[in-house]
Image (tube, grey):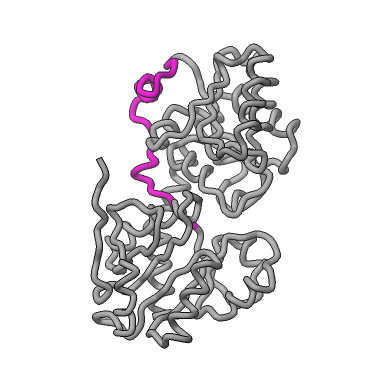
Amino acid sequence: MSMTRTYVDPDGVHVIAPNFKQRLSGVTSTIIQLVPVQNRLGQKVAVLGPGLPPHLPHLRFRDLWKLWRAPQGARHRVWHARRNIEMLPGIILRDILRMPLKLVFTSASQRKHSGWTKLLIRQMDAVIATSTKTAGYLEVPNTVVMHGIDCEIFRPAEDKAQAKNACGLDPNLSYIGCFGRIRHQKGTDLFVDAMIELLPSHPGWSAIIAGRATAKHINFENELKTRVKQAGLDDRILFVGEHKNIADWYRTLDLFVAPQRWEGFGLTPLEAMATAVPVVATDVGAFSELIVEGATGTLIPANDLPRMVVAAGALMDDVQTLQDHAMTAREHTTAQFALEGEANSLGMLYRRGAA
């Protein structure tokens, strides 16, 4: 049954979070998780655009004319863009239509920006980088605000065997997982090849691949399934598809691998660590700023299958270290990367530099 969207009057909105891409992405996921927390903290945020769940407070496009009036209790509204297609409308509303807006842009990109993107960024009132690596690619003053995670949604299982049962898994096995979109960039093939090498010598372990392949990457997924079948491991390397209750699947894991070849930020290691699951991750995105080497997991070079096999195998063989890492991972994530911390940092930036 479809739910009706919750629409709000712009007069009471202090921050607008536009989302102008229909397709679910990491940016969209960030907005979905962050906006409810921001509103609990009194930041008065509403979303604008498609592809967002109905329970979030939405603005109607037909109500945008009301942005000519300042909101109740403030001199400006904040337009918080996260993509080029959201920066440009903000510039038009502020500079051409002369609406009382302050423009904020969050960049997660770790590559040189195009001339067009640089031009848009220079028009912003404040710029946020999601990591120090990302900040290094920006040519304007910026503030690093790292993404957080909802540590209540992503929390350890009270009973791991029960968590495994709930997902139809064998409670007597240990599980190593790789979650996210299935494609070459995400390194799913590296994970599969590592498991093909490791699982025959680790009879107490099985592997889970959770996520979906878009139409463009279906052949890639099918080739991986064929590779697994030819290795005789189709009952131990499980492709479980995409799940809305992904936090439940994290609770079944004993070890997580983030094998990406490239990443902007990358939330999956945080999701795993918040669930008390140690991580083996490639040194891409913000992973080196999320993982404490030798305490919450292990970092390896990108696209390095032998190192992945060694790092994952070492933890699979060492139950005590795995348990120690699990406890530290949860403590580290709740202390440093709770979603409330990200929301509070944004609120301070809105007040200091944008509002």
Between 31 and 202, the residue placed more toward the observer is 31
Image point (28%, 73%), residue name: 10
What secondary structure do most residues of the magenta stretch adopt? Answer: loop
The part of the chain drawn in magenta is 147-171
User: Measured from the top left, where is residue 3 in percent x and y?
Assistant: 25, 47
Between 298 and 283, the residue placed more toward the observer is 283
Quadrant where the C terminus sits is: bottom left
Q: Is residue 122 above or below residue 242?
A: below
Residue 229 vs residue 2: left or right?
right
Q: Quadrant of residue 249?
A: top left
Image point (40%, 81%), residue name: 101
Image point (39%, 37%), residue name: 244
Quadrant where the N terminus sits is: top left
User: Measured from the top left, where is residue 291 in percent x and y?
Assistant: 57, 46
Q: Quadrant of residue 144?
A: bottom right
Q: Residue most toward the front?
A: 62
